[in-house]
Image (cartoon, rainbow, N blue to C red):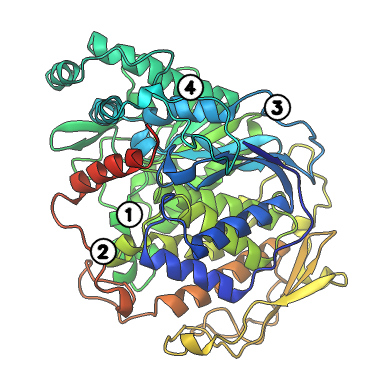
Amino acid sequence: MEQSTASPRTTTINIDDIITVLRIATQNQYSARELHTTNATIELNFTSLFGQDYEYQLISNTNGELSLYYPRRILVPTIDKWSNITTSKIQTTLDLRDYFVRSRIARCRSRFVVPVILIDGKYICRSSTVASWGEVYSRSGVDRLLDTSTRTTAPLILDSPVNPSGVTTDLDGPPNIAIEGAAAAAASSNTEVPQQQNIFDKLRGADIDLLKVLDVSSIVNLMVEKRKIMFGVNVTSSENSDKENRYRDFQLLILPYPGCEHFRDFSVQRYNGELMFYDWSLPLNDSSFHVPERVSSLVKTDWSFWKSWNSIDLTKNYLQLIIRHLEIDEHGLLVHCISGWDRTPLFISLLRLSLWADGWIHQSLTVEEILYLTLAYDWYLFGHCLPERLLRGEEILYFAFMMLPHLCSNDFVYKRSNNPPNSQLNTTTSDRSESVYSISALTRLNDANSNSSPPVDTTDHSTINFNRDADEISFAQKSDLNSNEEHENTSSPPKTIREEKLLAVSHLFQLCYRTVIPNRPPPVASNTNLLPQGLSAFNPRPIGREIARSFNNFIGQWRTQPR
């Protein structure tokens, strides 16, 4: 474990760096086992960007021994240097990695709870959902087969030549289960048999311990089903479906949100999210909206109509609900879906960008830098499989950033109880003071990108000016953000800082995205391959891909670990 303090500005991100992240993301899903120059650069850059505003811990995940699709170095922010809170929520004597080790199998694909945003001394965390017996037994079985229970959980120094694993499923002793017997009993029972209860008590108990160490009191569950069933086997569950009610001390916010398959309609509907409606009548949708009335009442909408909302309104109302809850709760929260790499980064990235636009987090980062950080950390390094999503036409990443123009109003502004009335959030672009530095947000693309056809005019040299002390922004541009819109009426009210920031990020993302993934005519079917032409041979993983991929991941992950 490595400690670091906030560092002076050492990294400057430009548009080519953002395009590089998108290009590598379209080629392969990130894996902690695959270290090459591009990944190493991305990992160093995001760490440097975090370090400009935060002190942090780095937890080693070399070779993916904790989780294969988590960063090789998991960054845990501890202190915001701009905040009055100078004490870390995580005690210096606490071995956070040991908590990760003990809880890793408790959640799907070993995607344990990780704090990724620090706001007002509270953590916003991400993970997958809790694992059910199907996955718990398979992972436990592989661990036992490969004798991983002899590994130590001692603290680990990064880049140390000694055992880099530190992984154990010991949990104060080997799991007291007979794999075959317990699995057979579980398959024929709707209740936890003694063997199940024993292992679940330990694993989910370790998961709960980690949540409490991170001071998480609320869990946002985005799943549309209570349990994920594959081939008749319960693969994943959810906190609200825990038969022993182990998560009773946590406030559960059940916000059913469509999975990545739903976003095949995005390109079909000509990228108009207001025309996207999810079919809630499907048999798998057995989860319902459930939020305590004291929380749901914070958003002025009729929640009884939640199934009738289009994708834009559903996302807006859910995000506003999470923000309002953050305001009134003194503790942190966890956001998760099933695997935690599609819907989860959508909401995590929108929260990060919204709070940044308000001036609460990443205060020193420019538009380019916050976009780079969000794409690299929230999406790529936490395992979002962009090649597979593009192959199936599931543009959930594009949808996330196209949501930003819909989040500009004060409804999404995070307000503390002691928020001063003359907050910078109500300041307009006409009130700018002289900027400390400026960078070009729209530069000419390299000749290598000349074959693409981005939907914006790259000769429009818009400039983003920042005032470092006031964290303010001025976005002066010659043309409107969307080429198909008319010029802004001169009588329109001036844009707020928040609106300028979010529109700048959305505009820059669209330019970079369409440079890497050119826009195509609207498909006539929802299964159109949207991969760039040079990557059209990406393995589609036909029938059985999930089983084969999971098995290969198990074997590959543990082969890299010393035994």
Identify the residue under disc 2. Answer: 392
Q: Are marks 4 and 1 in contact (CB under 8 Å)?
A: no
- Is tag 4's residue or tag 3's residue first in the polypeptide sequence? 3
The secondary structure type at the circle numbered 1 is: helix
- Is tag 2's residue or tag 1's residue first in the polypeptide sequence? 1
Image quarter where the C terminus lies is top left
Identify the residue under disc 1. Answer: 260
Identify the residue under disc 3. Answer: 92
Q: Residue furthest right?
A: 434
Q: Which mark is residue 208?
A: 4
Q: Quadrant of residue 225?
A: top left
Horizontal side, residue 559 vs residue 351: left or right: left
Choose between 320 and 355: the one closer to the eye: 355
Task: Give the foreground label among 2 and 1.
Answer: 2
Q: Marks 3/2: CA distance?
A: 45 Å
Task: Give the foreground label among 3 and 2.
Answer: 3
